[in-house]
Amino acid sequence: MSPTKPDLWRIPPQETLRASRAGPIAEFPADATPGFDGDRKNGTRLLADYGTRLAQLQEKLFAEGRAGGERSFLLVLQGMDTAGKGGIARHVGGTMDPQGLTVRGFGKPTDEELANDFLWRIRKALPPSGQIGIFDRSHYEDVLPVRVHNLVPEAQWRSRYAAINAFERELTASGTTVIKCALVVSKAEQKRRIARRLDRPDKHWKYDPGDIAERAHWDRYLAAYQDIFDLTDTDAAPWYLIPADRKWFSRLAVARLLVDGLTAMDLRWPAADFDIATERRRIAALEG
Amino acid sequence: MSPTKPDLWRIPPQETLRASRAGPIAEFPADATPGFDGDRKNGTRLLADYGTRLAQLQEKLFAEGRAGGERSFLLVLQGMDTAGKGGIARHVGGTMDPQGLTVRGFGKPTDEELANDFLWRIRKALPPSGQIGIFDRSHYEDVLPVRVHNLVPEAQWRSRYAAINAFERELTASGTTVIKCALVVSKAEQKRRIARRLDRPDKHWKYDPGDIAERAHWDRYLAAYQDIFDLTDTDAAPWYLIPADRKWFSRLAVARLLVDGLTAMDLRWPAADFDIATERRRIAALEG
């Protein structure tokens, strides 16, 4: 039972996109719009509705945090280069109040970060109570490029899946709702997107010649992703595969998962911790 | 010369609202719309235009940061309770990409913060290179409630104005553009806004009975603000008085100051640090 009404979703994305059910990533159709009975235009309109609801839900979570509540929300985004993680942060995160939202990117670790446990920089960036956090890349980088390029011995990266599960259990037990989305772009669409960056001088800053070398490791990345889904897709911190060849659909699907995740928190406006009648009298007595 | 075209501004806000020219805060008209030849409807439409431009300028700043640039932008917001600092963060900050924006609030300091210099928590929250930061309250709290309530000896808070000027000089010298806006709400409008919070259960969380006690210190706050303007309104880090009784105008004025401040940075897309023809050939050779 999804807490939102069906909209144009014939099947809620929780059922079609959950990693454990969506099948191996290597066979996942990146250009599909599973369960959604609508086109780009419908999707864009619905995304605007979700934006309004996200803003409302976020304000309640923020209010709860101000009133002493300790819950928060974390969206983890992973995906190959050009999959659109930044676009999700912008178009889905952008519907919310920036006061209650923290977007954090995790690039190549600094020397200080490397000198610490791989979760050290993640813990420092967790959303505080009442806040929504979006991670553009995350602790999963430590079992993705780190594994593909053998940056640490196998025994070390192998031990990280269990460490991640323990960390995420701890996170959710302390009141953070966690949703993890892997944006799946096809190899052909990635090629088009990389080429497009070269065509526009205002996109050159996004072009990294190293991205082409990374493509040579495509299948090893897919295998690393598959292990992530097999080992860390838990009910407490579920993984979703998001078809990302159509940007409008990936944004819509992630927004829907966020709306449902926040709705399931059953957020309420904090009750007044003062006497309303007394305060009315105090205000009436004010000058001005 | 303002870098933006006149729009409906007969006089740019830099000229009418700069603290040193806008006259004493105690006589500043909080419901005025100085220099703007338009009404709420015009202002709201223009704010949407500014939002589009802010998003473009922000992306260039972000790109510059990614390319190794060290510049950033800081908007400091101060104002009495209900003046609308949060609304600015939401409606002006909300036009930008949350990836490139950090909104930080500074409430009552923690024990750890009190054990450190008053600028310690501020330094930790400064926007990184390529980012825009919005401070909802700031280091100026240490010469506002701290001074009004004698939380530290006078000699100590008196020394802070010079410390703040030195700090802001250092900030701007290292590449951060700083703009400081004091939202000025009238005592009558504040009373209406406080009363409205009581009328709506979804606003009770914003109601703090302590705000009414603070109103008793109104004139001492005005005096503390006036000293701030007299002592820390510098060309490097200017103060603006923003009339805040009309929310649409305060948002418009702050957005205009941001647009102009970012435009004056003369942001350019970073040049490619790779050979475009070579990369085109590499891409053409890719499978997929």
Image: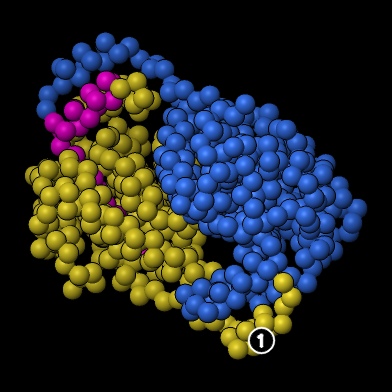
Chain colours: A blue, B yellow
Q: Residue at x 43, y 41 (%)?
A: A49
Q: Residue at x 58, y 44 (%)?
A: A36
| Residue B35 in picture, x, y percent from top left | 10, 58
Q: Nearer the viewer, residue B244 or A192?
A: A192
| Residue A229 in picture, x, y percent from top left | 78, 46
Q: Is residue B40 left or right of residue A115?
A: left
Query: Numbered disc 1: what chain?
Result: B
| Residue A141 in picture, x, y percent from top left | 72, 56
Q: Nearer the viewer, residue A168 or A253?
A: A253
Task: Give the total number of marks visible in the rendering.
Answer: 1
Q: Is residue A259 left or right of residue B178?
A: right
Q: Secondary structure at mark 1?
A: helix
Q: Is residue B183 left or right of residue A179?
A: left
Q: Which residue is mark 1?
A: B281
Q: Nearer the viewer, residue B211 or A44?
A: A44
The segment highlighted magenta reads B177-199
Residue B136 vs A287, above or below: the answer is below
Which quadrant holds the N terminus of chain B?
bottom left
Q: Residue at x 25, y 59 (%)?
A: B256
Q: Residue at x 40, y 56 (%)?
A: B96
**Residue neighbourhood size for the residue with mark 1, other residues' Cα within 10 Å, grouped as few (<14), some (14–19), many (≥20):** few
Q: Residue A222, located in which quarter of the rendered image?
A: bottom right
Q: Amino acid at mark 1?
A: Arg
Q: Residue B205, located in which quarter of the rendered image?
A: top left
Is residue A41 covered in magenta? no
Which quadrant holds the C terminus of chain B?
bottom right
Residue B75 vs A194, above or below: the answer is above
Does the rendering let one see residue B10?
yes
Q: Residue B282, located in which quarter of the rendered image?
A: bottom right
